[in-house]
Amino acid sequence: MTITNITFSSEQEQLRNAVMNFARNELNPGIAERDRAGSFPRDLWEKCAKQRILALPFPEKFGGDGFDFLTTVSVFHALGYACKDSGLVHALASQVICGIQLLLFGDESQKASLLPDLCSGKLIYAQAITEPCSGSDAFAMQTNAIKQDEQYIVNGTKTMISNGPIADNVIVFAISDKSKKAFGGVSCFIISKEATGFSKGKPLEKMGLRTLQNGELFFNDCTIPCTSLLGRAGQGMMIFNESMEWERTLIPALLLGEQERVLDECVKYAKERSAFGQPIAKFQAVSHKIAAMKVNAELGRLALYNVAYLKNQRKHAALESSIAKLFISESLKQACMEAIQIHGGYGYMTEFEVERELRDSVVSTIYSGTSEMQANIIARLAGL
Amino acid sequence: MSTKEIIRAFVSEELLHDHNQNKLQDEDQLIENGIIDSLGIMTLLVFLEEKFSIQVSGDDLVPENFSSITAISSLTERYLKK
């Protein structure tokens, strides 16, 4: 047993309440229109930055607020619960995950020059791994970075990159040594949107998370200085592994929050809506669906704070993060499907919002490692 | 058991497909030979944390430090002296 108490401290409660009030008042109005348009709310991004959401886990000397990772997770959990713009909160999480990579693997010069503008939200970051022909098999990537004197020449295409179309800086994974396997053959680079040979495609149309901007990135003899290297040459796979553990903790925090919001919406609706002379909550066909949602939310909470606790101590938690990602994402998708059923015909109408929750949830079992990949990792780490 | 013996036993038991500890030599190339892969390294890092109470991070997370039993042992000893 690694965690026995997930009671929030008074400071964490204050932060969580502040961010929930902020989200309800500032971030939720207009979500239906933004979702329909698929537009990124830059003005709300800036409000979130002013609220210091992007600065939470970073040291003060780099422009951050110096909170620990457990507190950061608790705030993103609250944000996921209160903010109905799931695309926006995913954009925020992507930024923080990039910042953690810079913090863990950047040299002092990179951290000092890049983290302040990341924390303030002035510059938007993206992480580029996925390629047209390599998704789950990430290290089948084709993008390569060839060292020539004091420069690297990068060629290749990345796709579906979150924040990609609006990013100022991108953390790019590329093959830097073909003679080696993924382990030692992949490196990581910080590439500015101004770099010669770097261009971006238009945002891709998606089913859900429509305010999050995803798109293609093109590197055509993109020339970058050697100082763009993040970590050491050949360290890409290690950075990827580390990054996934943080990502599979922070993203499930958002997903659990969304799941709890859907649960609350279902409880409220089941009490208000009547059929056959009584509230539908009185029918076990409905109440048992909600009971299952509640069980999953409580178990998800244990899985989430277990891994957050481990990461807070800078421990490795590949198994625990995969368990949290798998369980919470699958539970969310299931809860959203049940929410539509509980709401009946109204659930299918955009006015009632649970249809957007469902659309937003579908991709959660695909990105950051599909559920099938999480199961593979869990099986392997369980000794199989 | 020495650090090296503990690590050799773990790699043989958990990462080597046929669990034959006698086959594994201290200088065998674990990454090149596919004994340690991307998931194997996660398993190993958790083991080092739990067994030796060390947390390998940052610049030390490079393939060279995990290339052989000798390399892993040297890394571990270095952390134990910190």
Image: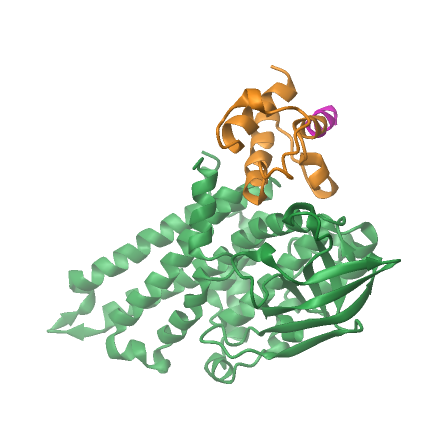
Chain colours: A green, B orange
**The magenta stretch spans residue A324:** no
Segment tinted magenta in the rendering: B75-82
Reply yes or no: does residue B79 show up in magenta.
yes
| A339 horizontally vs A64: left or right | left
Query: Is A248 on the left-hand or right-hand side of A222?
Result: left
Q: Residue drawn at (51%, 64%), measured in percent from left and top?
A: A20
**Residue A163 at what x, y percent from top left?**
62, 70
**Picture layout, residue A76 above or below residue A42:** above
Of residues A266 and A160, which is closer to you in this image? Answer: A160
Q: Position of residue A252 (x, y in %)?
A: 48, 56
Q: Is residue A288 left or right of residue A176?
A: left
Where does the N terminus of chain A fall, quadrant-wise?
A: top left
- Could you tell me what secondary structure mostly forms the magenta stretch? helix
Q: How many marks?
A: 0
Relative horizontal placement of residue A267, taking residue B24 as reference (left or right): left
Residue A296 vertical position relative to residue A19 in the rendered view, above or below:
above
Evaluate whether residue B52 shows in this view. yes
